[in-house]
Image: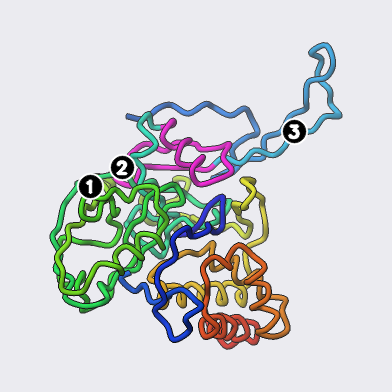
Amino acid sequence: MPLFNKKSTKISNPSPPMTKDPHHHAYHHDNNNYKNPPIPTAPSIHDSMSNGGGGGVGVGGHVDSTTVTKPQLVFNCQLAHGSPTGFITGFASVKELYQKIAECYDFSLDEILFCTLNSHKVDMSNLLGGQIGLNDFIFAHKKGRPKEVEIVKSEDALGLTITDNGAGYAFIKRIKSGSVIDRIPHIQIGDHIEKLDGINVVGKRHYEVARMLKDIPTGSTFTIRLVEPMKSGFQGIAPRKGTAGGKPGKQQAYGSGKETLRFKANGNAAIEDEHDDATQCGIDAINSLLDSFMGINDSELATQIWDLGSNKINSMDFAEAIDASDLEAFGFTDDFIIELWGAITDARQGRYKR
């Protein structure tokens, strides 16, 4: 998942080398009760966003018509297993977003596993990443049933792709077909990884959890404690298909906006135009490489890598930009940087199709 608030974090204990280059780190981590919301004053709400109007207050409490208030965005939200619609506003990071949702529905922040956009299903293609479209509808997935599973690591790679929610919870984004994990029906996409052999991993980043799984010796047995997302009950509450605004026959238009709210490393959020096709294809290709080489999924990290390489002329300049950034802590090998550069140049030249 995507990173929020801080695009990458220094790794305090890098993995031992796993490539031919003794100076770089390893990359193959394949195993890697509803509260009524405050009612905004008109004209606050227009579909799933608002531009709060009105003037400011001048000296002595008089209304100063020359003072312009900052536009305030309001997003629609529901709990994925079923709830009334809430209005969420006033956040600049994913953790603040989760806090606002928890306050709206009157439960603890740590009950939220992750959010999806425009779908109540555990659909990783709609996972909330480093941005939210201004017309996107947010669905929050709460903690459901916990489970402990004993696993025999019969192969080097478990077949997991791991991401995190940006607020301390790592969870399973993808399971490779035919892998060790794929043969265990109790483990599913969307499950939060809470403990490994009794060690609490809440608060760790996805690459840290992937490294811990990779470091488990092949042939050994370990126990994983998971928490699955809550399921049930949504069908009677979700907007009906084929209706919008009471008019039959028209599809509900979620996520139709061309602008997005992007979370920045400095903790601020900014409204920007959505990525063009070439940029989005490049980011998706980089994220696929992160999946293949590190067993993690992180759209914000992929975006940061794209930004570093999008204006570079050659791979040497790109490598120097990586080394000069906080991504240097990952210790990307020369071969991996060449792969990343190839994805960037292919996207810039239109070789990818969405």
Query: Dot 3 corresponds to which residue?
Result: 69
State whether residue 44 is above or below residue 81: above
- Residue 133 spot, x, y in % from top left: 56, 55
Query: Dot 2 corresponds to which residue?
Result: 82
Disc 3 residue type? Thr
Q: Residue at x 64, y 46 (%)?
A: 268
Q: Which residues are magenta?
A: 75-104
Mark 1 burial class by Cα count in 10 Å: few <14, some 14-19, many 20+: few
Q: CA distance from mark 1 to mark 2?
A: 7 Å
Q: CA distance from mark 2 to mark 3?
A: 35 Å
First in sequence: mark 1 vs mark 3: 3
- Residue 199 spot, x, y in % from top left: 26, 50
Which quarter of the figure has residue 324?
bottom right
Q: Residue at x 56, y 57 (%)?
A: 7
Of residues 248 and 97, the one nearer the viewer is 97
Element under disc 2? loop
Q: CA distance from mark 1 to mark 3?
A: 41 Å
Is 144 magenta? The answer is no
Q: How many marks?
A: 3
Of residues 270 and 345, the one nearer the viewer is 345
- Residue 210 spot, x, y in % from top left: 35, 64
Q: Residue at x 31, y 42 (%)?
A: 82
State whether residue 131 is above or below residue 98: below
Is 78 magenta? The answer is yes
Element under disc 1? loop
Mark 2 burial class by Cα count in 10 Å: few <14, some 14-19, many 20+: many
Query: Dot 1 corresponds to which residue?
Result: 232
- Residue 179 spot, x, y in % from top left: 22, 76
Q: Residue at x 33, y 39 (%)?
A: 111
Of residues 227 and 339, the one nearer the viewer is 339
